[in-house]
Amino acid sequence: MKKIIFLLLIFCFVFAVSAEERVTRLGQHPFYKSRDLKPEDLKVIALDKAGEVKQGFEQAGSGELVFAFLEQIQKADVQTVDLNPGDTVKWMLFKKGRKVQVKNDMVWAGKKPMTAYTFNVFRDGKLYEFIVPKICGNISLKSVSEVPAPTCALNVEPAEAVLGTPLKIDLCKSQNMVKAEVTVTDASGAVIKTIAMTPESCSAELTLDQVGEYVVSAAVWGQYEMKSPSGCEIAVKVLEPAPIAPPPPPPTKKYGTVKPLAFLVEGGPGLLKGTYTGMIWARAGVLVNVVKDSLDAVFTLGGGVPVQGDPWKSILMGNALLNVHTGPAYVAGGLGFSSKDCEREFKKGGIDLVGQLGINLFRSNDATGSIFGELRAPVITEDRGFEHNHKLLLGFRYIF
């Protein structure tokens, strides 16, 4: 069994070697008679010997390639190379007499390298490398390789944009791209914008100036003008901007307390009726917010010291008032109590009708400061006339 396998391997090796034809001399059967072929002579071969070139390509089994060859050789990038011993070609055209012939799978078996021209021909996604020795002009196919096709990968963000918002168009994930063109069309199919792109500049921003539906499409080209098998497109919408809300009204200046329950102190000069004797007074209390920024209930208790001595004496005062705000101004009214402020018989303590008129000076965080005038008139208590028992006060109030 081992001998059979060994014989089969030897047979395959011999067959493989014999399948390649070794060539040790060139120039005996030239396709184009010239001992020193020039690059420009290749164009002459394509023009003057197009028919023979076609015959040779068809014999070689590459008839579909001949027209691409004849066209592209006119502008091919022709380079000079060496055909080294051991180099192979898939086939070679030559002329024996007047007849075009082809040899396949040839190996250059000469002792020295041979100068030749090389150039490429592209067709249907494949790159064909040709080699033409200077000594004979024999057209030879050296290799065939696949050219990677370009692919289109288009991304557009956002898919729905408010008028004035730029769209970001991105082709950076496309493969094998040499160049690309992006086209933007509206709902009627009219072209709004075209943008050229390259691998180095594969994204762009575009701002559309009208509301509507648009289609962004892209075509990508690769090497040898290969176009992506299918383009790519994305539909986008440009929307009306949301209506602009009117600016909020300026904040209304608040004048009352911001807390449901606050403390206060107040004080100032005053006049005690009798002979309108001056005094200094002070009170402390609480303020209860009844209606925010409009109505408060104020409860205070304190006293006053007259600036003259006997028969005047210190007094005790208390108030229970309702305080109404109208902007920075306020008016308050209610009942109070005053003790006897003088030893004379017509001076008595008792219930007072209290009225206040004031204005807020400032408000800082939770604190408010104001000034006010206060009139205290005796009521209810008998033998306590207004003429001798009313009081006038000027005060500063601080609520905190």
Image: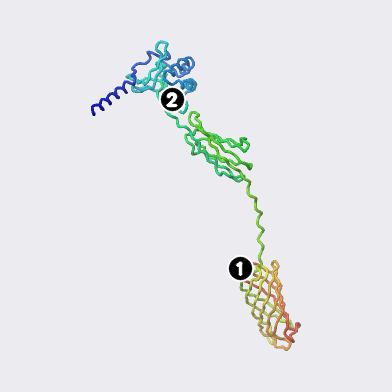
The residue that mark 2 highlights is: 128
Res 247 visible: yes
Q: Which of the two residues, 398 or 243, is positioned nearer the viewer here?
A: 243
**Residue 6 % position (x, y):** 25, 27
Amino acid on which the number 2 mark rests in the picture: Tyr
Neighbour tally class for label 1: few under 14, some 14-19, many 20 plus, Cα within 10 Å: few
Vertical position of residue 51 compared to residue 154: above or below: above
The location of residue 15, given as percent across then percent down, is: 31, 22
Q: Quadrant of the C terminus?
A: bottom right
Under mark 1, the amino acid is Asp
Q: Is residue 181 left or right of residue 281?
A: left
Residue 7 appears in which quarter of the rendering? top left
Q: Residue at x 46, y 28 (%)?
A: 125
Q: Is residue 6 left or right of residue 237?
A: left
Secondary-structure class at tag 1: loop
Q: Which of the two discs, 2 and 1, labels the residue nearer the N terminus?
A: 2
How did the renderer colour the structure?
rainbow
Residue that label 1 marks: 366
- Height in image: 294 above or below 320? above
Query: Gap between marks 2 and 1, in whole Å?
Result: 89 Å
Residue 186 locus on image (x, y percent): 61, 38
Q: Please, which residue is most extreme toward the top here?
A: 97
Left/right of residue 115 with respect to residue 239 in the rendered view? left
Q: Is residue 373 visible?
A: no
Label 2, secondary structure: give it: strand
Observer-nearest residue: 303 or 218? 218
